[in-house]
Structures are given as structure tokens and as C-alpha cells.
Amino acid sequence: MKRFFAQTYLWLLLAMLYAPIVIIAIFSFTEAKVLGNWTGFSTKLYTSLFSGGVHHSLLNAIENTLIIAIVAAALSTLLGSVAAIGIHNLRGRKKMVMNALNNIPMLNPDIITGISLFLLFVSLGITQGYTTVILAHVAFCTPYVVLCIMPRLQQMNPDIYEAALDLGATPLQAMRKVIIPEIKPGMISGFILAFTLSIDDFAVTIFTIGTGGLETLSTYIYADARKGGLTPELRPLSTIIFVTVLLLLIIINVRSQRAAKKKEALVK
């Protein structure tokens, strides 16, 4: 009975999480402008999305979102990798303090982060736009990258870096040929997580986007919803984003499992 109730609870939880996404995916294959009104199977919304039939402002929002997400994820991955290596090499109380400081931005409400960054940019006289949004996204994505890379560093044999130095490698060569290959799966996971968080973010973006007309997907959806409805092409767009992220995660997990099995086989 305990097993039955545990499995039932798990499936109910999964249903609550994924049912809205499944509904959006189903109704992306109909022309109905209102979600929930099925008017027959059709791929017109997908055709409209890719053929430029959607409103120009939505295309601009998608473009801005992708550019900001890619740049922010790349910078976050670079900074997070360096920060994770630095924290890993600390000892004692310093390491505890740095881990705690890294966790604070993740626990801090997004709206507080957004207001803080807004006040910072205003006090420094920085014009809000692409630059401020990217910096803001890097600020809240980097701790997540650190969190993805730290387990890989903890699993790594600490002697291989020293062995590389003893064999004549410079610290930079040892970093490039020893440490980076070891933490590469964590870096990829961190990049994907940062990319997803950047696309998803609204609270921080709305405070740092400025009044110059820059719009991201989250702010576009917010403004669209306030008008009394959502653009129908957002349904296929949401489905594509979800399926893309899901496929990437599956590929990464499969590759990680294969690499782990290969490593175990070599050890044996």
C-alpha cells in the first residue's frame, strides 16, 4: 500500500507539472485564437510562426530573447567555471563563506534582485537596455552554473592536476587539458540551465530593460496578456522551446551515462 500511494502521489505530481504544457502543445495544432477551443487539426500556427506571419514585435522579442540568453549563458558559464574552480580550491571557513555567498542570489527573490540591479544601474548612470539586461542575467545565472560544476570538481581526482604539473605542464595547460575536460559535462549543464533561466526570467528583466523599446519574450507575453489575450503563435513557440530543452537534456543525460560506463570499463 505504501508503494502504491507513493507511486500515485508521484504520478499526480507529474501530471500537475506537465498537464499545462501538454495542453498548450495539443492546442498549438489548431487555428483557434482562444486556448481550449478546438476547431480541428491544423499546423497553421506553426506555419505562421516560421513564415513571418506573426506580428513584427513578437519576432523582435524572440530575437532579443535569444541574443540575450546566448550571451548571458556564455558569460555565466565562463565566470561560473572560474568561480567554481576557485571555491573548490579554498579550504575551511573561507570555502563555507563563499558557498553561502553563492547560494544567496539563488534564494533571494527575483523581484529583490531586479530592484537592486535597477537602483545600481541608475546610481551609476548606466543607460538601460541590452547591456543592463545581459549584466543582470549574468548576475543571477552565474551562481546556478557554479552549482552545476561543483559536483564535477568534487568527483574529480585531486591528484591528476598535480600530476600534470609534475609532468611539465604549465598551470594553464593543466587547466585546459585536465580540469576543463573533467568539468565539461557540468559546464554544458550550466550553460543550458543559464540559457533556460534567461529565457524564462521576467522579474529581473522588467526592472533592467529600460524605456527604449527593448522587449523580450517574457515582457511581450506580459504586455500581451494585459490586453486581454495571448497571441496564438505563442502556443507553438512554447511547445518548440519545451521540446528543444527536453531533447537537449535527454542527449546530455545519455552522453553522461555512456561516459560513466566507459570510465567504469576502463577502470576495470
Image (spheres, rainbow, N blue to C red):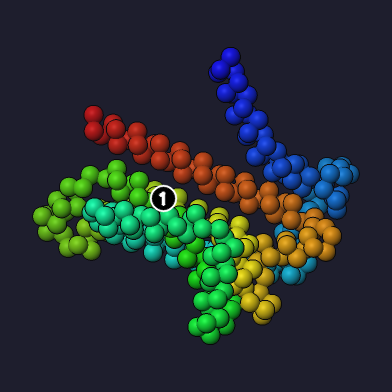
Q: Quadrant of the N terminus?
A: top right
Q: Residue at x 60, y 67 (%)?
A: 205
Q: Residue at x 29, y 43 (%)?
A: 155
Residue 47 in view in this figure: no
- The x, y position of residue 188, in whole percent, is 43, 52
**Of residues 204 and 230, the one drawn nearer to the viewer in this rendering:** 204
Judge whether 152 appears above or below 53 on screen: above
205 relative position to 156: left or right: right
Q: Residue at x 59, y 63 (%)?
A: 111
Q: Residue at x 69, y 65 (%)?
A: 219
116 relative position to 101: left or right: right
Going by the picture, which residue comes out furthest to the bottom?
A: 125
Three-letter amino acid code of the residue under disc 1: Cys
**Of residues 195 and 56, the one drawn nearer to the viewer in this rendering:** 195
- The x, y position of residue 206, in whole percent, is 64, 68
Judge whether 48 appears above or below 128 on screen: above
Assign a secondary structure to mark 1: helix
- The x, y position of residue 24, in whole percent, is 74, 45
Q: Quadrant of the C terminus?
A: top left
